[in-house]
Image: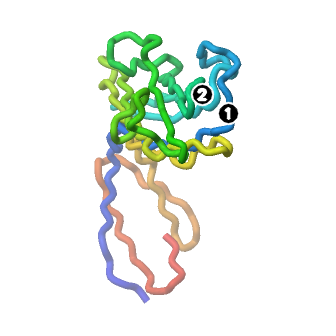
Amino acid sequence: MLGSVGTIQISTASLQAKATDSIEFVANLDARESVPASATFDPTDSNSYNHSYTTPVFDSLGNPHTVSQYFVKTANTNEWNLYVYVDGVQADLDGSGTADASDVETVVFGNDGTLDLGAASNTLTVDGNYNIPVTLAPVASNLDINVNLASITQYGSDFVVSKNSLMAIPPVTMPAFEWKTMARSTRPIPMASHNFRVRLCLLTSPLLRI
């Protein structure tokens, strides 16, 4: 038995990209870690940091980039330094125009393993955030990524990332649309116009193939 005939309208326009403007990062830094053997941080030397994690991000054109965070245990109690690199280049965290030794965040934990945002050496905001400015103009709009570390912890267990959530929309191009008949033959539908309409007769039976 056939139901009513309806009209389905499908847009074939590409979905506009939305640049990444925030990252929510939740992880546990291993409290059992020692100060790295190499005293000078170098992203190419795994002996100069304790943990690292890379997050894919997108600019206003939908081009992919990478944000890499490196966590370094310091000699101070429950304190870590955080270095950030974008596409393999050190991020200018303080916005001075030049990335240098001062572009490092300091993350401090209390004796309960949670962030101590009131610690004197802590550089995160009162909400547990820090910002990554990225210059991309004139090719694409500059990025200003807010990273939230409010739920990061330091317990005596392995380094684990439990959440790495970002706000972004990569570009999406609609593929060629196909429909299948009940005989399972496949017939492509030309995408000549911006929009097209397909009329489908929907079966009331639970077994429905389109």
Q: Bin the neighbour count of mark 1 within 10 Å (Cα to Cα): few under 14, some 14-19, many 20 and up.
A: some
| Residue 170 percent location from the top left of the image | 41, 40
Residue sitting nearer the eye, 51 or 139: 51
Left or right of 32 in this view: 102: left
Which residue is located at x 50 percent, y 29 percent? Answer: 66
Q: Amino acid at mark 2?
A: Lys
* Number of marks drawn: 2
| Residue 116 percent location from the top left of the image | 44, 39
Residue sitting nearer the eye, 175 or 186: 175
Q: Residue furthest bottom?
A: 1
Q: Bin the neighbour count of mark 2 within 10 Å (Cα to Cα): few under 14, some 14-19, many 20 and up.
A: many
Please say whether residue 164 is visible from this viewpoint: no
Which residue is located at x 54 percent, y 29 percent? Answer: 80
Q: Amino acid at mark 1?
A: Glu
Q: Which residue is mark 2?
A: 73
Provide the secondary structure element on which disc 2 rests.
strand
Give the colour scheme of this rendering: rainbow
Residues at marks 2 and 1 touching, judged by CB atoms closer than 8 Å: yes
Residue sitting nearer the eye, 139 or 52: 52
Residue 91: name its quadrant. Answer: top left
Left or right of 85 in this view: 128: left
Which residue is located at x 63 percent, y 24 percent? Answer: 49
Left or right of 72 in this view: 147: left
